[in-house]
Image: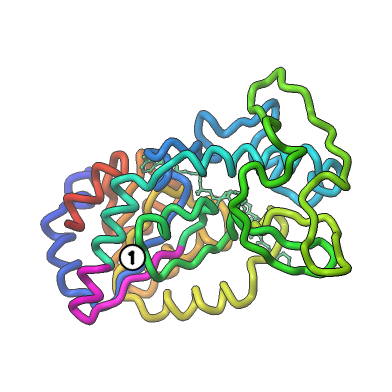
Amino acid sequence: SFHGSKSDSAEFKSLLSKTRNVVFLTGAGCSAESGIPTFRGAGGLWRKYKATELATLDAFNTNPSLVWEFYSYRREVVLTKKPNDAHHAIAEFEKRMVKEGREVHVITQNVDGLHQTAGSKNVIELHGSLFKTRCVKCGKIEENRQSPIVPALAGKGEPQLDAVDAKIPVEELPRCSQPGCDSLVRPHVVWFGEALEYKVLEKTDEVLEACDMCLLIGTSSVVYPAAGFAPSLADRGVPVAEFNLEETPATGAFRFHFHGPAGQTLPPILL
Ligand code: BJW
């Protein structure tokens, strides 16, 4: 079966040792062992909603209080979490590669910032960040790690099914700090139906173009455009290794597949 040949770590390590430019593509599974719920697994529900029902501009326009409760909850969760062995192994690997004049980039779909906390230097955040806001009016982007983000959200955003919506007046939700603006701000993340930032995509193209090896960690490979990146590399002949608890719609396209939690499968291969 494919497990035999696709999970040959000696062969993978030998290829890896000859690379000049390695890219890690990461998804929610990379942060799962830090205790951050994935989107499509168990734990992907907040109250009665799928995370993916709240991650839309429609939901925000209809009920900004509800969507801010959801994001405020996730900010507070992440603020209590630390990078895990997968994040650390990636950051250590980068340090070693750089010393040898080789390059490493991380292209992440995650919005939790844990790669940066672990020490990764070249991180592209495809879907934005929980710790940035963007003004709906003037577009100003601000970094913000306050807890709670505004007083009105203190103790709100409880995830359980019977929690009551806080119905926070829009004036008390996070607002823009630009003098004279003071409009509502939104999380600086990419929702369904929204385009990824042009500059981010441009940089991503550059990095993918230059890489000679790809490790795909903890993503279900269903959300585009990110889901298409590793299959395109594989088409170009770049070796791709998938690290996941399960097979995905993209598994068949890849040379390697390592089954299991990334915090356990990655360190022995990288360190
Ligand atoms: C482990 C593990 C462990 C667990 N170790 N592994 C082409 C075809 C079809 C549809 C489309 C298409 N192009 C666009 C679309 C529409 C849509 C889309 O892709 N829909 C599909 C679902 C069908 N895409 C979009 O809307 C994108 N926009 C776009 O294309 O715009 C076009 C446009 C152009 C010009 C003008 C206007 C528009 C935007 C997508 C944005 C996605 N945003 C979210 C929310 C971000 C903010 C937030 O966090 O709230 O991003 S959705 C959510 O999914 C989040 C994630 O980054 C993303 C991916 O999820 P991920 O990371 O893969 O997580 P999971 O939970 O799905 O999987 C976890 C995996 O880990 C599993 O496989 C586990 O087995 C594994 N795992 N523990 C190893 N310990």
Foreground residue among 173 and 124: 173
Give me the residue at 57% from left, 63% from top. 225
- In the figure, residue 23 lies in which quadrant? bottom left
With 45 as the anchor, is 97 left or right in this view? left
Q: Is residue 150 magenta?
A: no
Question: Measured along the vertical axis of the image, is residue 111 above or below residue 1?
Answer: below
Could you tell me residue 103's position as x and y percent? 30, 76
> Percent from the top left, x then y, of residue 54?
71, 42
- List x then y, in percent, for residue 115: 41, 57
Q: Is residue 38 above or below residue 253?
A: above
Residue 263 percent across, percent down from the top left:
29, 44
Q: Quadrant of residue 198?
A: bottom right
Quarter of the figure that contains the N terminus: top left
Residue drawn 88% across the image and 68% down it: 180
Q: Which residue is mark 1?
A: 214
Which residue is at the front of the view, 251 or 73?
73
Query: Is the C terminus in the top left, top right, bottom left or bottom right quadrant?
Result: bottom left
Q: Which region is colored magenta?
A: 95-107
Q: What residue appears at the point 59 percent right and 44 percent down from the top-left corner?
A: 75
Residue labelled 1 has its Cβ within 8 Å of some atom of ligand 1: no
